[in-house]
Image: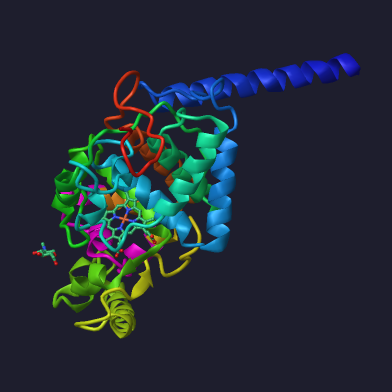
Amino acid sequence: MKICGIFLQLLVLVVIFFHGMVSSSSSYDGPLVLNFYKETCPLVQQIVRRNVEIAVLKDPRMAASLLRLHFHDCFVTGCDGSVLLDDSGSIVSEKQAGPNVNSLRGFEIIDRIKYILEEACPQTVSCADILALAARDAVVLRGGPSWDIYLGRRDSMKAGFNGANNFLPAPNSSLEALIASFQKQGLDASDLVALSGGHTMGEARCLSFRQRIYEDNADKYDHRDQEQLIYRRRAAGRVFRRALRSICPKSGRDEALAPLDSMTPARFDNHYFHSIIRGEGLLHSDNVLVREDYAEGEIRKHVWAYANDQELFFAAFVNSMLKMGSINVLTGGQGEIRSNCRFINS
Ligand code: HEM
Ligand SMILES: *[C@@H]1O[C@H](CO)[C@@H](O)[C@H](O)[C@H]1NC(C)=O
C-alpha cells in the first residue's frame, strides 16, 4: 500500500516534469531563460509580485497600466526598459511621445520595486525584466492566466522618442495599419487579436475615443452575416455611443475616462471580445478587428474563437506575450543593469 503510494507520487512528479519541459520548449526559443536570477536574486519573483499586489490593492487600475507599460517598452527598440528613462543629458524621454504623454502610468511602482531589489540584490535585476514580471503579475491578479517569464533582459542606454511616435499604433489606426505595425515587431495577425485582448482591463481618455464616437460612419463595422440582427446591433451601437458622448463631449474634457471593456472593466477575461462583436469596442482600433471584408474574415475568426472559448484566448494571449516579451532583447554583455530605472548609469 505504502510502496504503491510512493510510486504514484513519483509518477505524478515525472508527469509534471515532462509536461513542464514540453510546454516551455514549445513556446519560446531565444536568448532569455527561466530562473535567470536563481543564484543571484532568488527572491526577485516574490518581491515583484508582492509589490504589484500592494499597488493594485491601492489602485485597481494599476494592473492595466503595468501591462500597458511592458507593451510600450517592447514596441520601441525592444523590451529594454527604454520607456522608463527620463530626460537627461542626450536622452530624450519616450514619456513625452504622443502615445505616452499624459497617459502611461505606473512609473512610481517600477521605481519602488527597483529600489527594493537594489537593496536585496544590487545591480542584478534589469528594469526590463521588472516590467515583464510586473505585467504578468498584473494579469494574474485580475483573474487572467499565469505563465513563466523568461528572464535575462538588459537595459538600454538610450531612449526612442521618435520610435515611440512611429511604432506605437494609434487608436484611430485602420486594420491594415495595425497589422503592419505588429508585423514590424515580428508579430502576426493572430498576435494582434490576442494581444488586443489586453484591453479587457483599464481605461482610455476621451482624447483616444472621441473621433470614434462622433464619426459619421460609425456603423460601418457592424457585421452583417446575420441580417435580422443588424437593426438591433445598430440600435445598441447608437445607445453605446450616446452614453460615451455624455462622458466625452465634442470638445473639452479630453482627460475624461471610460473603460476599454465596459462589461467587466476590472477583470481579465474574454468579455472584451464579446464587446467588440457587439460593436461596443471603445477604440476604433478595437472595432476594426471584427471587419468582415478583410482577408475573408481571417482576423474576425480569431475574435469569434476567443469570444467563445476563454481558455483558448488565455492560451493565445500567453503565447503572444512570450513573443512580445522577447522583441529585440539585449542580453549577455549588451546594455547594462540600471541602478535607477529613470537614468542610465553614469
Ligand atoms: C493593437 C493596437 C493597440 C492600440 C491602438 C492601443 C491603444 C490604446 C489606447 C489609445 C489606450 C488608452 C490610452 C489613453 O487614452 O490614455 C490604451 C490603453 C490600454 N492598452 Fe492598448 N493599444 C493597443 C494594443 C495593446 C496591447 C498589445 C496591450 C497589452 C497586451 C494593450 C494594453 C492596454 C491597457 C491595459 C490599457 C489601459 C491602461 C490603463 O488603464 O492605464 N494595448 N491602448
Ligand atoms: C488619427 O488622429 C490623428 C490625431 O488626432 C490625426 O492627425 C490623424 O489624421 C487621424 N488618422 C486617421 C486615419 O483618422
Left or right of residue 14, residue 232 in this image: left
The extreme right residue here reads 1
Expressed as whole percent of the image width and height from the top left, the position of residue 332 reads 35, 19
Magenta segment: does it hold 337? no
Left or right of residue 95, residue 341 in this image: right
Q: Residue at x 40, y 40 (%)?
A: 340
Q: Residue at x 20, y 54 (%)?
A: 97
Expressed as whole percent of the image width and height from the top left, the position of residue 114 reads 47, 41
Q: Quadrant of ligand 1?
A: bottom left
In the image, 151 versus 259, the foreground residue is 151
Q: Is residue 329 above or below residue 333?
A: below
Which residues are the magenta region? 273-298
Prevailing secondary structure class for the magenta stretch in the rendered image? helix
Number of marks present in the image shown: 0
Magenta segment: does it hold 278? yes
In the image, 27 versus 328, the foreground residue is 328
Quadrant location, the N terminus: top right
Q: Is residue 210 above or below residue 130?
A: below
Q: Residue at x 60, y 32 (%)?
A: 43
Residue 194 visible in rendering: no
Q: Is residue 165 above or below residue 324?
A: below
Expressed as whole percent of the image width and height from the top left, the position of residue 73 reads 31, 43
